[in-house]
Image (spheres, rainbow, N blue to C red):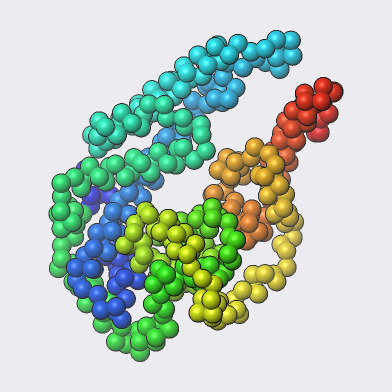
Amino acid sequence: MYIHELIGDKADIIEQAMGNPGLAPKRKPTIEQAMKAVASQVEFAAMQNVQQKVLPIIQDMYDMYVLMNGEYEDVGMLSEADAAVTEPDEDFVNASRQEYSSGLDDELEKVLEPFEALLSADWLGRNTIDTRLWEENAIVKLSQSVAKEVFKQLSYQKTPAQVLSNAGIVQADVEIFFEQHLAQAETPKGKQAMSDATANSAEDLAAKIKSHVGNDFDQMTVYDDLSLACDDDEILANGAGKRLGLDEDDVQALQMVVLEYGDETADHMIELIGNASSGEKAAKPKAERKPAAPKAQTAAPAEGAVDPKVLVLMKNHGSTKDTEMSATLGVSRATYNNWLNGKNAFSPDGDQYSAVRDELVRNINGLLEALATLDGTEQMEVS
């Protein structure tokens, strides 16, 4: 397999790379920087392609395994009737779960066989034993790891120029797009765009975010939004950017920070935000964006919408996991988070309404059972 087989049309890759804020004409970028941006886009496109191939394969395998063997938490446990009269044998439960886990690892090895030539022995040894695919987000993380390892092997001991060559891209290709990119800046439209764009540094962006989220911000929430804002998906990135108090130009500037810090961008920004002050400089851009904010805040609730408080309470007081619930409702994790945070209206259809209600009932009855056990009273149930 060659890298060019994973990236699609090379012209699209180069054109997408030209949109990197690090190549903004006013920054006077060089062809070397342009080549670096293209190489970064090639890596992203290749890994995304691999993940899109691998994720459904692993997910289908896991779903079938659960269908045939049940959920991990239920393995080795007594039936409800038996549990009422005897305690489960802990050694039997542990042995059964170990067998379940080993069987799942064996099935994973089988579905990864077509990719073994592109996965190192070291990676296979670390990632196909005790996989624990039943844990939250484990399958997504594994597919990302596969994609990263495949690209690592395809680019092993290759210089950046050799990686681009393997992708079917040479400097002459990049130069054509780069010259056109710079020439567009000389048009009236290009000059206006340059004058309107912000040239914020990572520190400036951190100050804006700090001004928006406040001194006592929830670090995990901000970290999650930063991770999405660093995404190449424009819709996801701009949506997360708004929650952080950033406009589209700021999100583009954040992409330049990604070019420098890569996967550590969110960690780097969290540190800067923690050290930033929320002074007048950061507050001014927020005021300039004022016309756009009230529109979302004053919009009438959608007909049939459920108060997001329902999802928040279910998460905070039960065992509901975002990834599992989003899958149950048939939506992406990002969509579910927007419902959870009240960014978008949650207007469930009949099946989704029933799924949420069933989850609430499951959590409530579990807590009622715990309370009854603690108090030594008869268990109440809701239905």
Would residue 354 be visible to someone looking at this image? no
User: Residue 95, image x and y in percent?
Assistant: 50, 14
Above/below status of 324 relative to 71: below
Q: Residue at x 68, y 39 (%)?
A: 318
Q: Residue at x 45, y 59 (%)?
A: 271
Left/right of residue 266 with respect to residue 367 in the rendered view: left
User: Residue 344, image x and y in percent?
Assistant: 63, 60
User: Between 94 and 31, which is closer to the camera in this rendering?
Assistant: 94
Total number of numbered labels? 0
Left/right of residue 94 with respect to residue 356 in the rendered view: left
Above/below status of 246 relative to 271: below
Q: Residue at x 30, y 31 (%)?
A: 124
Above/below status of 329 relative to 221: above
User: Between 10 and 290, which is closer to the camera in this rendering?
Assistant: 290
Q: Quadrant of the C terminus?
A: top right
Left/right of residue 185 with respect to residue 79 in the rendered view: left
User: Residue 297, image x and y in percent?
Assistant: 67, 69
User: Residue 328, image x and y in percent?
Assistant: 60, 41
Q: Quadrant of the N terminus?
A: top left
Q: Residue at x 54, y 72 (%)?
A: 278
Left/right of residue 9 with respect to residue 315 in the rendered view: left
Would residue 265 be visible to someone looking at this image? yes
